[in-house]
Structures are given as C-alpha cells and as structure tokens.
Amino acid sequence: MSGKLIIISAPSGCGKSTIIHDLTQRGNIDMTFSVSATNRKPRQGEIDGVHYHFLTNEAFHDRIAAGDFLEYEEVYPGRFYGTLKSEINRALDAGTNIVLDIDVKGGINVKRLYGERAIAIFIQPPSVDELRRRLENRGTESREVIDERIARAEFELSLAPQFDTIVVNDNLDEAVDRAEKTILNFIAQ
C-alpha cells in the first residue's frame, strides 16, 4: 500500500511548524516529515537535512533546471523553498504517510497533483494583528521583513478556501487536536 500526503500550509508565523512538531511528539499518527529545500541561511539551531536541505543559490537553481522539485516557490525576493520529488517518492513508495510543511501556493499545487491521496490543511492565525505580534516576538526578523511577511500573509489568507480544512491557531492545544483528528480521519479512509 502506498502512503498518503498530509499538506500543512500557513502564512509565516501561524504555527504550522509548531503544530507539526507537536503532532510528531504525540506519536498518534504514522507519518514522516518531508524536509524541504531552501536557499536561505540556517537559523540558529537548524541542522541541514533535518530542518531543511540548505542549498546555495546556484545549487537551488541547478535543481530547478534539473526538474528535481515537486514544487518550489520564490517566497520572498531571492528566497526560494521547495519540495524535492525524491523525498516524497521515497516515502510514498515505502507506504509511509508523509507530512509537508510548505508555503500556501505550494500546498495548493501539490494537492492538485495528488488529489485524493493528499489532504491540504491551512493553519490560520486568529487575526493579522496577532500574526504581527507573533512575528515580532520571535525576534528573528527586522521590521521590514515582518512587514513583507504580513503583506504576503494577507494574500495567502485569501487562498485558505482552496484547502480541504482550515484550522485556526488561537489556542495551540486545540489547533493540534483538530489537526490530529482531521489527519487520522483522512488516513483511515
């Protein structure tokens, strides 16, 4: 039996990575995390091959030209993220359910490609103001970068209806519970 895809997308700062981490820690869902590729520098504590496949600009563009990505996106000017086909195919062929932590447009595109073999979950902030507060509290980006992320988030929020399920992350435990229930129901089908 081949595996299923679990797509979790959200604007930056909405908690998708935290929700995925918590789901993994609970251990109730048989799934493996897909490691995305990016051309950005690692943040403090991030490990190549664990958090992301960190590629140089040249290497990322070479992989695009070679057709190695299932999807990729220039999320911010000069900053690319993508899902390597090899990551997904290896897991699905082994019968493993794989969770993708990808940007909103990428989530829509992958769902379109895999149809009923995938579920697309959109993590939504309670409000744009709360999203700004979360990004500011991270302390990892400048005011200009936060403003860019908010502008992008406002666009991405308009795409939420294209997802199978929307989970509002107002209370983390409740958001994790809802995501877990949704995924378990999907896998059981």
Image: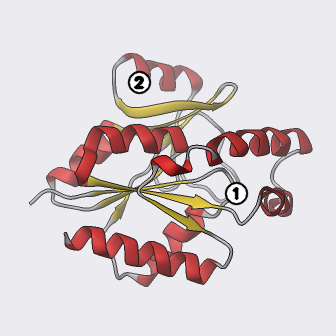
Amino acid at dot 2: Arg
Q: Position of residue 156 (x, y in %)?
A: 63, 43
Q: Give left or right: position of 18 versus 106.
A: right
Q: How many marks?
A: 2
Q: Position of residue 75 (x, y in %)?
A: 62, 34
Which sits earlier in the primary sequence, circle 1 or circle 2?
Answer: 1
Mark 1 nearby-residue class (10 Å; few <14, some 14–19, many ≥20): many
Residue 30 visible, this angle: no
The quarter of the picture where residue 151 lies is: top right
Q: Give left or right: position of 101 versus 46.
A: left
Residue 63 - label: 2
Q: Quadrant of the N terminus?
A: bottom left
Q: Quadrant of the C terminus?
A: bottom left
Q: Is there CB contact under 8 Å for labels 1 and 2?
A: no
**SS of the residue under disc 1:** loop
Q: Position of residue 18 (x, y in %)?
A: 59, 68
| Residue drawn at the location 58% of the way across and 53% of the way down | 10
- Determine the residue located farthest toward the left in the rendered image: 1
Asked whether 30 or 41 is in front, the reply is 30
**In the rendered image, the vertical position of residue 132 relative to residue 66, given as above or below:** below
- Determine the residue located farthest toward the right in the rendered image: 143
**In the rendered image, the vertical position of residue 63 relative to residue 110, given as above or below:** above
The quarter of the picture where residue 129 lies is: bottom right
Residue 17 visible, this angle: yes
Asked whether 54 or 182 is in front, the reply is 182
Residue 13 - label: 1
Amino acid at dot 1: Gly
**SS of the residue under disc 2:** helix
Mark 2 nearby-residue class (10 Å; few <14, some 14–19, many ≥20): some
**In the rendered image, the vertical position of residue 88 relative to residue 125, given as above or below:** above
| Residue drawn at the location 61% of the way across and 55% of the way down | 46
